[in-house]
Image (spheres, grey):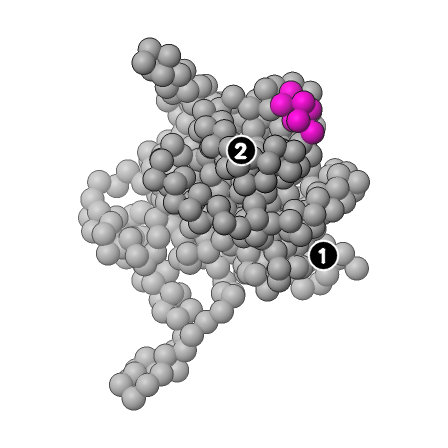
């Protein structure tokens, strides 16, 4: 019996609850036919860079077996597995490692710690990382479709030098793995020249939609996460009821975009913080074009209510809220002690629920539109379902707004400016 057929998993469903004005819901209803048409076009893969659509159902078994075999090889060789990449090349794996309960791993013991490099240009960060890993066994994974992005390129040069000094040239090369384009690009050429074990990032899947490819699955498998369960969860998001929920959310978000300029993604558990960071890239890079889209912002609750709560309650109402709440937390703590009083016997999860309800009630009183996203639990299955659900929602929303959700011309502008500056120094 596979993970998808397991009844416990099949009963897990993301639930969406809307607390918005009737005008928003009415506007959303007028968009439903268009949303159905857009999602149907996505499934036909009429547009470039839609290879991620239904990818979990099409993932080749031999490719998955290769990932799992390589992950076991990596785990046997190192204490630290350094993933080098930026944006979609690292955010998805990092989100999964934070989100997924370690008890949901298939081989948690004796697996390497996955650490990340090349997503910033801080010398302090990378010096501290080198100090942490230099005396232990190390393997590297460089993720880049082209191999030319500055941040990971600099980190790769630095960490290749560390490997060579530690192991010698030949052994260092055997400890380098890559995920890149199948045929072209600087990194593919280097991998072929040096014999790196290289996996393919399909050419029709963009970085921010790549977490269910070797980009995310290889690091996660190396860490011992049940990647088959992730793929099963992603497949479940194509079920009729969840697909309908994604279409409806796209309609509501499109209606809200006409009224608001900011979407606050509020997470109530630290395990969802890195997933929220993945959402920020997914929505910001996909929808923010041609003067359209809303600015996605991550908010930690209840932490940030003590710094931003005043603005949310009484400031300029330029935002709506998407509340990300884990229904069944992995672990919990009950309050005890002689002075516990009315709190005696109550669990942290009860207080967290109280924050959710109190915040929603207060913000609705001042007409803040709210979308509640109830996440079943912190399983690998739920993570896969979340990823595909939000990918579909994002793509459908972008198309309803009239923008191409699969390019990122603004990112290229900053890259050019950075390289022009360096060339002039």
Q: Position of residue 384 (x, y in %)?
A: 61, 48
The dot on residue 160 is 2
- Nearer to the camera, 260 or 383: 383
Relative to 182, residue 266 above or below: below
Q: What is the secondary structure assignment of the residue under circle 2?
A: helix
Residue 256 falls left or right of residue 282: left
Residue 367 falls left or right of residue 410: left
Q: Which residue is mark 1?
A: 3
Q: Please say whether residue 191 is one of the residues in the magenta stretch.
A: yes
Residue at the spot 53% in from the left edge and 50% down from the top edge: 136
Relative to 6, residue 234 above or below: above
Which span is picked out in magenta?
188-195
Residue 145 falls left or right of residue 153: right
- Nearer to the camera, 286 or 17: 286
Q: CA distance from mark 2 to mark 1?
A: 38 Å
Residue at the spot 49% in from the left edge and 24% down from the top edge: 149
2 or 1: tag closer to the N-terminus? 1
- Nearer to the camera, 203 or 135: 135
Relative to 370, residue 399 above or below: above
**Quadrant showing the C terminus:** top left
Residue at the spot 36% in from the left edge and 35% down from the top edge: 122
Q: What is the secondary structure assignment of the residue under circle 1?
A: helix
**Residue 364 visible at all:** yes
Instruction: Kindly report which numbered mark, 2 or 1, lies closer to the viewer in this rendering.
Output: 2
Q: Position of residue 330 (x, y in %)?
A: 52, 66
Q: Position of residue 57 (x, y in %)?
A: 73, 41
């Amino acid at each position: 019996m596979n993970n998808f057929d397991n009844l416990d998993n099949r009963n897990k469903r993301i639930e969406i609850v809307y607390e918005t004005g009737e005008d928003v819901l009415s506007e959303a209803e007028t968009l439903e036919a268009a949303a159905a048409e857009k999602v149907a076009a996505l499934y036909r893969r009429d547009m470039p860079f839609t290879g991620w659509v239904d990818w979990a159902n099409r993932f080749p078994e031999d490719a998955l077996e290769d990932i799992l075999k390589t992950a076991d090889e990596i785990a046997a060789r190192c204490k630290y597995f350094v993933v080098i990449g930026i944006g979609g090349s690292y955010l998805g794996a990092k989100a999964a490692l934070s989100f997924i309960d370690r008890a949901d791993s298939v081989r948690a013991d004796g697996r390497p710690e996955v650490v990340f490099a090349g997503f910033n240009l801080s010398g302090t960060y990378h010096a501290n990382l080198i100090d942490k890993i230099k005396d232990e066994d190390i393997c590297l994974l460089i993720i880049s479709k082209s191999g030319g992005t500055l941040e990971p390129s600099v980190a790769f040069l630095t960490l290749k030098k560390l490997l060579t000094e530690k192991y010698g040239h030949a052994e260092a090369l055997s400890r380098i793995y890559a995920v890149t384009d199948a045929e072209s690009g600087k990194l593919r050429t280097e991998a072929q020249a040096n014999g790196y074990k290289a996996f393919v990032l399909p050419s029709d899947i963009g970085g921010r939609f790549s977490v269910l490819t070797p980009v995310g699955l290889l690091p996660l498998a190396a860490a011992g996460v049940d990647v088959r369960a992730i793929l099963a969860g992603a497949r479940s998001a194509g079920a009729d009821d969840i697909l309908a929920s994604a279409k409806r959310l796209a309609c509501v978000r499109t209606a809200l975009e006409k009224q608001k300029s900011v979407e606050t993604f509020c997470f109530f558990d630290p395990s969802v913080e890195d997933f929220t960071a993945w959402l920020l890239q997914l929505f910001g890079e996909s929808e923010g074009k041609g003067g359209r889209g809303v600015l996605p912002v991550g908010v930690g609750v209840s932490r940030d209510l003590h710094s931003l709560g005043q603005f949310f309650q009484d400031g300029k109402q330029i935002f709506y809220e998407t509340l990300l709440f884990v229904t069944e937390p992995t672990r919990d703590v009950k309050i005890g002690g002689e002075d516990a009083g009315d709190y005696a016997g109550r669990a942290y999860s009860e207080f967290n629920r109280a924050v959710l309800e109190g915040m929603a009630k207060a913000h609705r009183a001042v007409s803040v539109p709210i979308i509640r996203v109830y996440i079943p639990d912190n399983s690998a299955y739920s993570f896969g379902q979340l990823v595909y659900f939000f990918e579909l929602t994002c793509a459908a929303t972008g198309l309803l707004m009239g923008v191409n959700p699969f390019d990122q011309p603004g990112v290229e502008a900053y890259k050019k400016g950075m390289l022009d500056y360096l060339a002039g120094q």
